[in-house]
Amino acid sequence: MHADTIRKLIEDGLPGAEVEVRGDDGVHFEALVVHPDFAGRLPLARHRMVYATLGSLMGNEIHALALRTLTPDEQRPG
């Protein structure tokens, strides 16, 4: 699995999301996902939204995905 593939899947599943994915070993990844639909949602709900874009890849091809999920307002400094 490649980080770019995961990025594209998340972007396809959450249109308008800004996504950065890193991972060197092909099974463990880190992602920053910024999306306005995260507003008013707890972190667990945000993570579930991202996991839903990846479906059965989670726990199989993707062994671990560390997520940082923000709204556009949370991403802006100040």
Image (tube, helix red, strand yellow):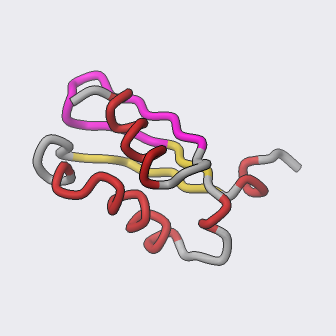
Dividing the picture into quadrants, the one containing residue 62 is top left
Is residue 35 depicted above or below 44 in this figure? above
Q: Residue lying farthest top? A: 24
Question: Which residue is nearer to you in this view: 28 or 37?
Answer: 37
Q: Position of residue 70 (x, y in %)?
A: 62, 56
Residue 48 drawn at (x, y percent): 38, 67
Residue under the point 34% across and 38% down: 6
Region rendered in magenta: 18-31
At x 54%, y 75%, the residue is 42
Q: Considering the image in quadrants, where does the N terminus appear?
A: top left
For the image, the number of numbered tags is 0
Asked if residue 25 lies in the magenta stretch, the reply is yes
Q: Where in the figure is residue 22, as x and y percent of width and height?
A: 40, 29
Q: Quadrant of residue 21?
A: top left
47 lies left or right of 78: left
Q: With respect to residue 42, does 10 lie above or below?
A: above
37 or 29, which lies in front? 37
In the rendered image, residue 21 lying in the magenta stretch gets the answer yes
Q: Is residue 24 left or right of residue 50?
A: left
